[in-house]
Image (tube, rainbow, N blue to C red):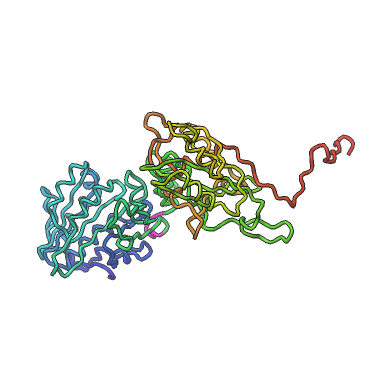
Amino acid sequence: MNCLSVINEQGEEQVMYEPDPALHQDEFHASTTPNVLALGTRGTGKSLQLRMDAILRCLLVPNFQALIIRRTMPELRKSHLVYIEYEMKLLGGIFLRTISTAKFPNGSSIVFAHCETEADVLNFLSSQYGFIGFDELSTFTLNQFLQISAACRAPTDAPYQAVVRAGSNPLGVGAEWMETWFVTKTVRLEDFPDYNPDDYQMIFSKLEDNKHLDHERYANRLKNLPDHVRRAWLLGEFVMEGAYFADFRRVNDAGEPWHVIPTIPVLKDRTTNQALPIFNYTWLSVYRAIDWGYFPDPAVCLWIAVLPNKQAIVFKERTWKKTLAADVAVQIKQESEGLHIIETFCDPTMMIKTGAVYSIGELFENTGVPLTAAKNDRRDFGYAVHNYLNTIIDGTPQLQIVKPMGIYGCPELIRTFPQLRMDPHDPTKIANGEDHWVVALAYFCMGQAQPSRDPVIPVIPYWMQPKKRSRLYA
C-alpha cells in the first residue's frame, strides 16, 4: 500500500498513515505468514504499525473483528487509547470508551484489552478474532501468547486469513521464548510437536531506520540507562531480565561476532605461513567437559580447543537422554577420534558410588575416558565463566563458541547461555534451570587448562636465554 488518506473536516485530503519502507512497515503489512513479529529498538514505530495493520484490515473486510492487547491497562491508555478516538473520527467511526472498542461504519471493530495475570487469559478463550495484535510481546508469557492466539481463527468461507501480529523490543519476561519462537526458531519439538518454523516470521528495524527521529540525541538519552536495558533498546539485543550472564554477547556494539563465531578459527602455519583451520594441527590441545544426567536432566559433553594464545574455542557439543553411562562414554570416545585430548573435566557426582559396583565415573574410565573431577559450586561456576567472557586476547574474548555448522557447533550452549538467571536468594549464584551446557563449560573454566604449544616454536629454558644488558652500561 502507498498510504491511508482521509478527508478531514475542512474537506482536505489528509494522509493518516504512510508505511515507512526503511522501517519495513510495508513488508509487515504485506506478509501472509500466520504469525509475524515486528522486532526493533525503541523509536521504530511498532505500536503505530500494529494499530494501523488492524485498522486496514477492518476497513477492507466488513464485520471484521480485531483485538489489540497489552499487558496492563495503564500501558494501553498511554499508547493506543491516546490516538484511537481521533483516528476513528477521521474514519467515520466511533470509539466506545466504556468497553474500549472502536466501531467502523462497515460493522468491523477493534477491541483493546489487557492481560495482567494468567487468570486473565480466560477472558479471551470464548472469543474469535481475525486479527490479534500483541503490543510489546516480550511482556507476555508463552502460555498467554499461545492461549490467546488460539482465539485467532476465521470461518471456512471467510475472504481473509486470520493472523497474529506483534510488536516488541527484545527486553522483558518473555524475551527468552520470543527469541526462540520467532528469531532462532529452536523450539523443542518434543515439547511442542505442532510447531512449524515457517508459521513464524520476524521483521527487524533499528533506531537508525527512523528518519523522523534525532538519532544522536535519542541514543545519548538511552545510554544513561543500565547496560542491559541500553543494549536492548538501543542495539536490539536480546537481554533477559535478571540474566546471570548479561555479559554474554553474540555480537559486539559494531555488530561483529563476539562470543559466538560463525566459522572454525584459523591459525597461521609457522612453516608455510598459511592460515589453516585449527583442526589441521594435530598438536592442538583439546579439552572435554561433562555434566552428567540421565532423565529428565541430560548428559552433556563439550569439546574445547585451547589455542597457543590461551583463547578457548568451544567447537562441539553432544547431548544424551536416557542413555547408559558406558554408551555415552563410547560415543564421546568416537567423537574425539583424531583430536589431541588433554583432559576431561567432569561433574564430581560422577565419582560417587550409590550402591552399584562401579560409579558413573569408573564406568567412563573403564571405557577409556579418563576424568578429572571438578568443583561443584554455583558461585564459583559463575565467576570462572565471567572471567573467560570478559578477558580480551588479541582484541577478541578469551571464550568463543562456534555456531552450528555440520558436525561442529554448540546450539544448546548458545541457546541457554543468555537464559540463565540469578538465584533470587543469592545473586552471586546461578539459579537452577536449563543450565547443563553452561555448567559443563564452567567445569572447564575452573580447570586451569593450559594453552597449546606449537612444536615448531622451540621452548628455551630460562637458564639458557641470553641475559639482557643493563641500561647503565648500554
Q: Which residues are magenta?
A: 209-214
Percent coordinates x, y for residue 284 in the rendering: 64, 50
> Based on the displayed image, in which of its 4 quarters is residue 205 positioned?
bottom left
Q: Relative to 44, is 329 on the left or the right? A: right
- Prevailing secondary structure class for the magenta stretch in the rendered image: loop
Query: Which residue is rendered at x = 90% and y = 36% of the image?
Result: 473
Judge whether residue 87 is colored magenta.
no
Q: Quick one: 170 or 354, which is closer to the camera?
A: 354
Quarter of the rendering occupied by the C terminus = top right
Q: Is residue 113 above or below residue 383?
A: below
Quarter of the rendering occupied by the N terminus = bottom left
Percent coordinates x, y for residue 20 in the rendering: 34, 64
Q: Is residue 6 above or below residue 458?
A: below
> Based on the displayed image, in which of its 4 quarters is residue 162 positioned?
bottom left
Visible in this render: residue 221? no
Outermost residue to the front: 357
